[in-house]
Amino acid sequence: MMKAFKKYVKLQASPEDVYNALVNPVMLEIWTGEPAVMSEEPGSPFSLWDGSITGTNKAFEKNRLISQEWDFGKEYPSSEVTLLLHPDGDGTRLEIRHTGIPDAYFDNMSEGWVSDYIGGLRQLFED
């Protein structure tokens, strides 16, 4: 059984700054605190949190959309992650959609999205 995670997050930063934080490997390393491999080239592999999250970049729309396939090991098909950036007043509303999460990983994945991913971005932009 596969599950989906969806969340909206308001960040105190422009869509340009949020997008840059999500695709620039130097910025990724700053807010995750771990080595990152990232390129805006569709089909390129990526790695976050020193290899804890790996997958393939699918599509990019500058300052608007990032689409990725996240790997969960050989026994599961890849899951789909879509990050949408919506201008919202003086900030950005980040829409996170993660589909195809194996049941066994769902609680850990949901917690990681909130504490590590969203928490790291909030810290970057609000401290």
Image (tube, rainbow, N blue to C red):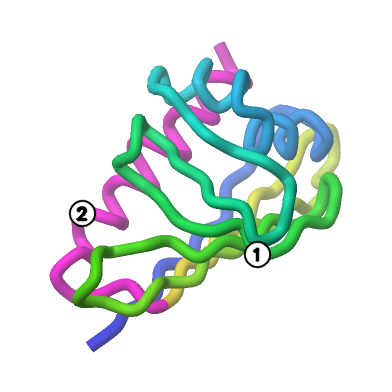
**x%, y% of residue 109?**
29, 56
Q: Is residue 116 above or below residue 114?
A: above
In the rendered structure, which disc, 2 or 1, sits on the residue that comes first in sequence?
A: 1
Residue for point 20% across, 64% down: 105
Closer to us: mark 2 or mark 1?
1
In this view, which residue lies farthest toward the bottom?
A: 1
Identify the main secondary structure in magenta.
Answer: helix
Residue identifier under label 2: 108
Q: Amino acid at mark 1?
A: Lys
**35 on left or right of 73:** right
| Residue toward you, 24 or 115 | 24
Label 1, residues with CA under 10 Å away: few <14, some 14-19, many ≥20: some
* Span highlighted in magenta in the image: 100-127
Residue identifier under label 1: 58
Q: Amino acid at mark 2?
A: Asn
| Residue toward you, 83 or 55 | 55
Does the magenta segment cover residue 105?
yes
**x%, y% of residue 19?**
73, 39
Which image quadrant: the N terminus? bottom left
**106 on left or right of 4:** left
**x%, y% of residue 2?**
29, 83
Residue for point 85% across, 40% down: 89
